[in-house]
Image: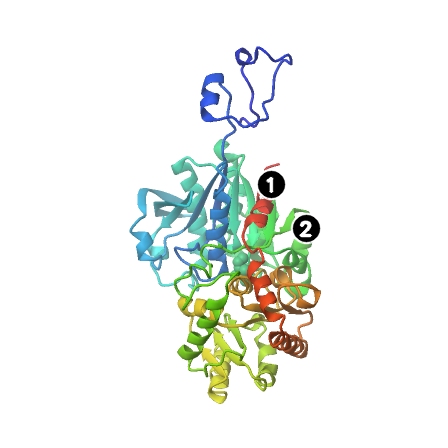
Amino acid sequence: MATTKTVKKSAKKKVAAPIEVVETPVSQEECKTCEIAVEPKKKYLFVASEAAPFIATGGLAEVIGSLSKALATDESYDVRVIIPLYQDIRKEYRKEFRFIGNIFVPLSWRNQYCGIFEYKANNVTYYFVDNEYYFKRPGCYGYYDDGERFAFFCRGVMEILNFIGFYPDVLHCHDWQAALAALYLKTSYCQRPEYQFIRAVFTIHNIEYQGKYSLDVLEDLFGISYSYKNLVEYDRCINLMKGAIECCEAFSTVSPSYSEEIKTPFYSHGLDQIIRRNESKLTGILNGIDPDYYNPATDKALFQNYNASDVSGKAVCKEELQKMLGLPVKAETPIIAMISRLVSHKGLDLVKEVIEQVLRNDVQFVLLGTGDSEYENYFADLARRYQGKAVSVITFNSDLSRKIYSGADLFLMPSKSEPCGLSQMIASRYGTVAIVRETGGLRDSIKPYGAGGNGFTFREYNAYDMLYVINEALSVYRSGAWANLVKKAMETDFTWSASAKNYEELYERAMK
Ligand code: GLC
């Protein structure tokens, strides 16, 4: 593979040195006349189980969509993404997909049909892996045979590379559903000449889900020889995340703080020993958000658009939100919002403990989300008991979420653990000041007001520490300093620009 640009002897008459390395970039035209070998594009392939805008169940999809787009703005990269072709992939996209062929994917004793569809947008090429038996079902996950479904997907990815003749420099696998792609590369495909230079990078978006299976299905279900048992075995189980960590050239998590936290038992869901053993390969890179997709100046879901230099539209958003949710329309009453999956690690126990004390103030509380019935019932009941002060919308609705991000004043996110979290960034971009616990990406994106930061933070997982900063936030809200804080939150750079560079470095390191 040509990695430097060399000039043919005939083209370098004026040059004294025997072989010149040309440092300055050359155009295609120049390169034809003086026959300079142009450095080939770097090829990156994201392997993931979901990608926005096609299908999304959470932050993973948003990151796959926005990071690939951000990297692809660099003309010297060829960025591609591959995901399963689920039944729920949005129709308006599906009809644009182009069928490029089909292959059969060998996996253990199975040999399964695999259709391949392609779609191009924003300089990124997307592939969709089709097999109706595995993916023509509602939703993405939660089936008894998820292990087999994602084994087929990952094995399919490896075979598709050959079909499309695309051998990436970096195979970037995300979360346990894509871990097997790294494992197949290292346990089998790297022996083929075309695959031998492919490097594997693995990103942990959430360490809670590791892909654990009984050891006796290693060959039969996953098609991995028992001679590789040590690679994937952990705690007497197959652990696909552990396998990917062991065999990749480099791995990352979605914030620097989380990359430290997962070295400890409190955060690691049992994997801290593996993380520590591989820590020389680990980096933490903070996620970004797509500034076009989340833009209060253009967002069509908003009652009125606004920007950091003129936030007057935000007051309209607040008023309309209050009307829509049946809350008293009061401009001076702060709205504290939560938009969250209703699960324990989101810090809901802290909220349960002190929310009634918060509601003694002149505040309104709005919650949007679904999850465990314990929390759904609690918040539904809270709204019944505090009518006119608290509203709980137990559903997920993207349009309403944007109306809340824009219409609220404060955004509460007191997670027990949070690999990165995107909501605090979206809220800030919409001028809704975040109150977060200092963990993972929350700690890396929101800095305390007292130290000149863009929000409010507390360290210990303790309801009264949270109550203290909520009260601090409410008093700043009532002070003359609020408008500046809103502006500061809105102007914080949550784009991918810094983090995309960190990924480039990570890839460079993996390629070495
Ligand atoms: C997972 C994490 C979340 C992160 C997202 C994208 O959903 O729980 O914190 O922001 O992945 O990386």
Q: Between 441 and 221, which is closer to the camera in this rendering?
A: 441
Tell whether 118 sits left or right of 410. Answer: left
Percent of width and height locating residue 183: 53, 46
Tell me: is circle 2 under 8 Å from ligand 1.
no
Q: Residue furthest left?
A: 95
- Number of the label disc, if any, that sits on residue 279: 2
Whether the residues at callouts 1 and 2 have beta carbons within 8 Å, the answer is no
Q: Amino acid at mark 1?
A: Ala
> How crowded is the residue under tag 2: few (<14 C-alpha within 10 Å), some, or many (20+)?
some
Identified at 63% across, 70% down, the residue is 481
* Residue at mark 1 to residue at mark 2: CA–CA distance: 14 Å
Q: Quadrant of the C terminus?
A: top right
The answer to whether residue 382 is above or below residue 6 is: below
205 lies above or below 10: below
Residue indicated by mark 1: 510
Question: Residue 314: x percent and y percent?
Answer: 48, 69
What is the x, y in percent for residue 509? 62, 40
Judge left or right: residue 500 versus residue 121: right
The residue type indicated by label 2 comes to Glu
Q: Is residue 214 visible?
A: no
- Does any portion of residue 258 appear in the rendered image? yes
Q: Position of residue 171 (x, y in %)?
A: 51, 43
**Residue lying farthest to the bottom in this orientation:** 385
- Disc with the residue nearer the chain's start (1 vs 2): 2
Q: At 45% across and 82% down in the image, what residue appears?
A: 327
How many labels were placed on the picture? 2
Q: Secondary structure at mark 2?
A: helix
Which of the colour schemes (rainbow, by chain, secondary structure, one colour) is used? rainbow
Q: Is disc 1 surrounded by few (<14), some (14 to 19) or many (20+) residues within 10 Å?
A: some
In this picture, residue 289 sits left or right of residue 438: left
Q: Nearer the viewer, residue 106 or 404?
A: 404
